[in-house]
Each structure stands twice: as structure tokens, then as C-alpha cells.
Image (cartoon, coloured by chain):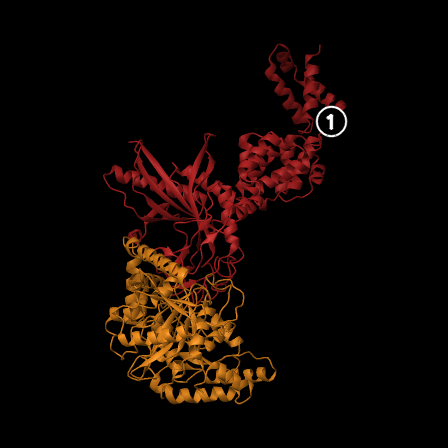
Amino acid sequence: MLSKTVAELAGALTRKEVSARELTQAYLDKIHQLNPALNAFVTITAEKALAQADTADSRRAQGNAGPLTGIPIAHKDIFCTRGVLTACGSRMLHNFIAPYDATVVERLEQAGAIMLGKTNMDEFAMGSSNETSWFGPVRNPWDHARVPGGSSGGSAAAVAAGLCAMATGTDTGGSIRQPASFCGLTGLKPTYGRVSRWGMIAFASSLDQAGPLTRSAEDAALMMNAIAGSDLRDSTCLELGFEDFTAKLNEPLAGLRIGLPREHFTKDLNPAVQTILQNAIRTLESLGASFKEVTLPNNYLSVPAYYVIAPAEASANLSRFDGVRFGYRCENPDNLDDLYKRSRGEGFGDEVKRRIMVGTYALSAGYYDAYYIKAQKIRRLIKQDFDSAFNDVDLILGPTSPHTAFKLGEKVSDPVTMYLEDIYTIAVNLAGLPGMSLPAGMLNGLPIGMQLVGPSLSESRLLNVAHQFQMNTDWHSQRPEV
Amino acid sequence: MNWETVIGLEVHVQLATKSKLFSGSATEFGAAPNTQASTYDLALPGTLPVMNEEVLRMAVSFGLAVDADIGKRSVFDRKNYFYPDLPKGYQITQLEFPTVGRGSLKIQLENGSEKVIGITRAHIEEDAGKSLHEDFQGMSGIDLNRAGTPLLEIVSDPDLRNAKEAVAYLKKLHSIILYLGISDGNMSQGSMRCDANVSVRKKGATEFGTRTEIKNVNSFRFVEKAINYEVQRQIELIEDGGRVVQETRLYDSDKDETRSMRSKEVANDYRYFPEPDLLPVIIDDEYIAAVRATLPELPGARCLRFVSQYSLSEYDADVLTSSRNMADYFEEVARLCGDAKLSANWVTADLLGLLNKNDLDITSSPIKPAQLGTMISRIKDNTISGKLAKTVFEALAEGESDVDQIIEARGLKQVTDTGAIEKLVDDVIASNPDQVAQYRAGKDAVFGFFVGQAMKISKGKANPAQLNELLRNKLKAE
């Protein structure tokens, strides 16, 4: 039961095979049992969850329920939750309780989803392995010696291990898609501006986007129906009317043109991953899609450009954590400078400090043009590459990650190797486009995903292709033994 | 050695919106600390800015009032620095693409000529909170009520050549801002704050000297004094073989001197970059035209109208239009009594004198336009003489309210009865035979003596015109 999809659970709830309270209690029990080993949750809100479950049950009884009513969810600890600790993986916020809910949290609650708790993550979403968290690393449910990916590692591990039915994530450079690939999940990073960022702790404001981590494309569509849409509190949120992301799930793929970026299918690509992608391509071909090579000539610049823009924005976004009004404050500061230096020195971890320094440097007088401005130019070129590719094709398919989940500790001491983890995902954030990862195969007992990228606002199309793929394959139905 | 002073002003004007620039918090002055600070103003994580559109309208209206280029695409930037009263660790401002571009302002110089002062730009930004260093024994208090209040920073070209010009420019700005109603302009409460960039150079030099910036001077008078002090300091420094250091200086009004603040502040690197939480603000001609249509008559135009419509001197018109409230006051008085010239005289001389003496603003004048209007009407209908009107004016200033009652109670009514005046004239002529002889011998100047005598006897109440006429006739006779 706990490993079923949201769509299946909604059916079970509707048919009264299970109540929201029973379902919630079952997930809480499983969290209690497995979380000590996985460390996926940092906060468990059992009492609140059971109260919400009762509300969901009465809504269902009144016939006032949507598909998510009564479905237990976990929120990445980057989303502010009223009255519940929001630590963002950092000692800096180890004591921060927001007096408000993020728009995403609020909308899911309105849809009747039940919050089980908050999930572990890389500190301030900076990381690709969930190893930078102040709360310790998360274990990959497929192999506890391996990382779940990051930064939304706790959310991915929780869904994969059946500790919740679905989870929220955020994706600044691949933080939904890479963990989805490592944990065998479907993860969608929506078009920039599709989902409100209000109440979501900012890493890099021009790149951050919230999205679903689920067991199927259909589930992702159901979550998108709840979280997408304009929000007056976020000026960068697009003003769009309601879109039913499930409406096109069953459209046939005949006539679909998919591009394969030359730059992603090179001899550098792991042959096993290559084989898995070829199999997926054949499946999609059999469903009516045609394939064609496209080129993204500036893609190779995406990692360097990203590691200027994201740290630059982060260096300012994280200035508010100064020990003055909330969060971590050092003991007995001598004076103001000491308060700043020690609060930030003790409150932030190494990776966060590294990025603040890189960003500060990139914005400094004399370097701004050489780094920040140049990175912005590259960003425009990368966007143009996608735009011209989408003149010829409807979607682009490629790898999400260069490999399956790696071992804990394997890359944590080498930042550059870690940064290259996101080589296939980062360009999508720079271009503001929707991208998703869905399970495409297994390699040595570990799942691996493929990535679909579409033009701006093409989420319905991406979900349609993913759903059709999942109707004809069972990679997404694989579950780890837990 | 002959020195020339070069001054440029940066004026921060707090815009009189009901809520803050990027949050819904109230902006009222004087509330209990931190009662007007929302989650955004506290920079709690996850909160985001949403632009207050009223701020844009106010900025554009200012731009139109100084004939400036209006930025059709303005962009907000982050200015990064750490300070406890700056909650986000950056200030949202406009660096490269301000809402108001190049414009200009005319000021009146003391010699009566006009000078055009260039306005480089005016940009929208957030105010910081306040650090309170008293009352907290060894600690500082932070009040974030002001944090996020909208400011318009108006930057002038270095066109000002002395402290008086700087003050004239500042007063003109102040007047425009009040005309537009975009700020209360209250300098003592910090609604209008002035930083002055001051340098000196040898007359005829083309390069600017090294400048210092005097921060946050909070009255017109202090601006003048601070600049004068700083100019003198720089000249003496250079003449003594020293060099002016580019730095920020603070004016101490108690000691009437400027002194150096941290000079390392000049070396601050603010690491500006475009604010990713806000989209560029795009406006079109239609928007600008709509704002233009709401502009009130501005001081320049009103001044010209006063000259042509009321036949006032340029000087009087300029004084009367220096503030919107003053101009409104004058027009109300003129309407009530039907004599603009006389109204202008009373307002610019007696009323302004009274207000200045008591350090009052026209809005808190003890004499209301209706009272002054009635009083002038009584001059016009010959009830009182212009001279005795001063007595009425003083009574009004003391708080008496009814003009006619004042005239009645004090017996200030003019004597207009020809018989009575004739008797008066006869008496004066009869009792001053020597002077009569002098006058008749051609010494015209003696005429004033007779008037004075007659007025003295009548206690000033004789109608001057009638008196003059009768005197001349009677003295001429025989």
C-alpha cells in the first residue's frame, strides 16, 4: 500500500479501502521504523499530520475531496512551514520557525495533502549528494552506502523508501532531477515562474524552482495541478490561468519529434547509460516518436556560467543570515564585526561558505564584467541554443546524470567533480525551461533516469510523454527492498 | 588666491505612500519600534518583494515636474553591505536604469537672475531601519519601522557654486515635492535628507577638485552652514599645502563643523547586480501621459500666471509660489477681497514677517485667509486706513477673530465725514501760521507736516485721500 502511486492511493481512499488517518498512521509508522537509518526526515509532524488526516477524511465524507485529499506528503526543508521548524539543512536555521507557509505548502494543504514532516537536504540546497546537510547525510534506499543525490535528497529517499506518497523538491541546477534519477523517481522542474517561490528559502533566485518528486508522471501532474499558478506575492511568478496537467497524459505520441543533443551523446557518456537511453528511445519510437540529432553548442559552458550566477545571487540571498534577527547567533559577541563573523562562520558549512566567497568575488568591482556579465551572456547563448533546437523538435531527450548514485564520501572532498554531476541538468535552469527526469533503466541494481526537456510552459507535453513511456515500461514501478 | 566652489547634492525624499516600497507595512512616522515591520521587512527567509505601484507614479510625476527623461524600462539592483538596520544585507535600489533620467530645475539667484541646475537622475530605493544606540547599555536597538520605506534619491549635477545656490536648489526641490504631494518634505523628521558633495578648485580650472561628501544634513540652514564650513576647511587645507581626502564627513550642528566619518567607507564595494526577485518595470507613453494629466500646476507655471493674471512683480510671484500652501493662501485672500496687489503686499510683507518671527509655516498661520481677506476689504471700502489696518492685523495675530469687531472695539474707523475733516484742517492751519507761510512761499515739503499734525489729532483715523485734498485746497486758498 505505501509504495502505491498517488493516483492509486486516491482510488483506494475514494473506494474507502483505507482512510486518510490509517494511511497517515501507516506512513508515520514506517518513518519511525526506517528513518533512523535513512535520515530522510529532519522533522516529523505526526500530530499535525493526523489532524490533517481527520480533516481529509471528513472532506472525503462530504464529497468535497480532490485527488490529493488525504495523500501524505513530505516537504523539502527549504519550504517555510508555519509553526514548524524550517532549517534548510543548516545550523544557521537550526531554530527558525517561520510564522507563515510557503505558497507551495499552502496550496498542497488546501488540496488536502497531509504533511508528514520536513525532509533533509543539502545545506541551503547547495550540493548534489545531500552530504552538505548540517543534519548529516541521507542514505539512498537502494543502497545505504550510496547518496540519494541532492539537493532534494531527503525528499527523493523518502518517496523511494515509501515513507511518503509524494514529496516537494526544489531545483536550481538539477536538485529535483538528479535525486529522481538516483532514487528511481519521476521528478519535474517546471518552467521558471510556473510555481511561486514565495516562502521557499532562496538559493539563486533567478534559477530556483519548486517541483514534484513522485513515483509516476501521473502523480507529478496531480501535484502540479495543486502547486502551479500565479501568486501576487512572487513578482517573478507567471500570470497564467489554471492548467490541468493531467488532461494530456493520454494523448498519443504519434508525430512527436524528439531531439538528441549531439553534445550529450558522445564517447564520454557511460556506455551502460548510453544503452539504457537507446532502449528508451526505441520504446518511444515504437509509440510513434521520431528522433533527430540537435545541437546545443554552448552547453559545455553551462557549469562555469552557473557557478558564477548561482553563487553571485546566493552571496546576496544569504546576507540576511547575520545573527541579528533570527537563526544562529554566536555566543557572547565582542562587537558587531565579531557577531557577523562568528555567527556566519559557525552557522554556515563549508560548501555554503565556498559559494558565498565565489559569488562575492564574481560581483566584486573589477571582476563583475569578466565574470557576472560574461556568465549572463553565456546564459543568453544557452537559451538561444534551446530556442533554435525547439524550432526542429518538440522535446529533447538525454541523460539526467552521468551515472547511477555514487558512494557516500566519494566526491565530497572534490567540489569540481561534484559540480560536474549537474552537467546535463544545469543548462535547463539557466534557460528557465521545464525539465524532468524519469526512470529509464537499472544498472547494477541501481536506478538511472533519463531527462526530457521542453520549451517554456511545455510541462503538459513532458508529462504526457513520460506517462506514455511509463504505460509501456515498468522502470518507474521498481522499488528498493527496505 | 581665488577659489571656486563646486557642489552637487544628493537628496533623499521619503515618498508619502501609505505602505512600504516592497511590503504592505504602514509607513507612518513615530510608531512604537518594530510595530510597522512585516516578515519581508524583517528579511525572514522565503519572503519576496512586491513593488508598490504608487511609488512608481510618484517618481514619474517628479520626473515630469523637472522635465526629465522618464525611464520606460527601469531595473532594480541590489546594493550589498552589512549593517544591522539593513535586514536583507542589501538595499534594493536602481543603478543603471533609474525611473527618472536627466532633467533640470531653475533657481532664482540673489541678484534676481535665474540659473538652470541639471538633475542627473532620480532613482527609487528602499530606506534602511534605524539603529538606536542610547538606552541599551552597551548594546544597540534596531527599529525596522523605517526599513523599506520608499525613497526617491535625486542627484544634481555639480552645477551649484556656493552654499546659497545649494539652499535655493534645495528649497526649489522642496517646493516641487510639496506641490506634487509626493512627500511631506519634513526635514527634521528625515522625510527629506541631503548629502552634499563639495569640492573647491582654482578659478578658471577645468578639472574638479577632490570632493568630500557631507552626510545627512537636516535643515536648509545647516546645509548652508555645513557647506560654508567645509569650503573654508578645504581652502585652508590646500593653501596650507595639504590635500583634500575623498571621504564622507558628518556635520555637527552644535559645533558648526564637519568631521571625518570612517574614510574606509569610500572603499566599500557594494557589488551591485540586478535584483532577480523583481522584474524590470516597463511603462509606456500612455502611462506617462496619464501621470502627466494628474500633475498639479507647478511653481514655475503658477508664478508666471500670478505675474500675468494679477500683475504681480516677478519677485512677489516667486515668493508667493514658493510653496503650494502659500500660493493657495494668497489666492484665497485675493479672491475674497478682490485686490490681488494689496493681498500680495500683505501676505509677502506682514504675514510672512509674522510667520518668520514665530517660526511658523503658512499652514499654521494664526491669521486665516478669510480674516486677512476681510481686513483688506475694509481697507478697500475705506472703513479703515492702511495704516490702522496694521493694528487690526496685530489683533488678529494675537488671536482675536472678528475683523469688524476689532475695528469697532478699538474705534479704528476712518473719519470720512467731509465736515469733520474740514474742521480738522482749519484747526491745523490756524495753529501753525509759520509753516503755512513757508508752504505758501513754495516749500512743498512742509505739506507732510500738516498731514502729520492732522493725523495726530485724528489719531490716524482721518481718511488720507480726503485729508490731502482738503489740505491742498485750503493751503492754496487766500
Q: Residue at x 33, y 34 (%)?
A: B4
Instruction: Answer whether residue B86 is visible to the viewer in this image.
Output: no
Q: Position of residue A360 (x, y in %)?
A: 30, 60
Q: Position of residue A30 (x, y in %)?
A: 41, 88
Chain that bears disc 1: B
Compare residues A112 and B31 and report the one nearer the observer: A112
Judging from the image, what is the letter of the chain drawn in red? B
Q: Is residue B202 above or below residue A185?
A: above
Q: State the hue of chain A.
A: orange
Q: Residue at x 30, y 39 (%)?
A: B209
Q: Label 1's element?
A: loop
Q: Residue at x 27, y 80 (%)?
A: A407
Q: Quadrant of the C terminus of chain A?
A: bottom left
**Would residue A155 appear left or right of B308 to someone viewing this image?**
left
The local crowd at label 1, few if under 14, some if 14 to 19, many if 20 or more residues have their Cα within 10 Å, is: some
Mark 1 highlights which residue? B416
Compare residues A187 and B441 and report the one nearer the observer: A187
Instruction: Answer whether residue A285 is visible to the viewer in this image.
Output: yes
Compare residues B382 and A224 and report the one nearer the observer: A224
Q: Is residue B321 above or below residue A468?
A: above
**Would residue A52 appear left or right of A187 to someone viewing this image?**
right
Q: Position of residue B363 (x, y in %)?
A: 58, 45
Looking at the image, how many numbered discs can be counted on the residues? Answer: 1
Compare residues B445 and A432 and report the one nearer the observer: A432
Q: Amino acid at mark 1?
A: Thr
Q: Is residue B1 above or below residue B271?
A: above
Q: Is residue B476 above or below residue B16?
A: above
**Would residue A290 appear left or right of A403 to someone viewing this image?**
right
Q: Position of residue A41 (x, y in %)?
A: 39, 81
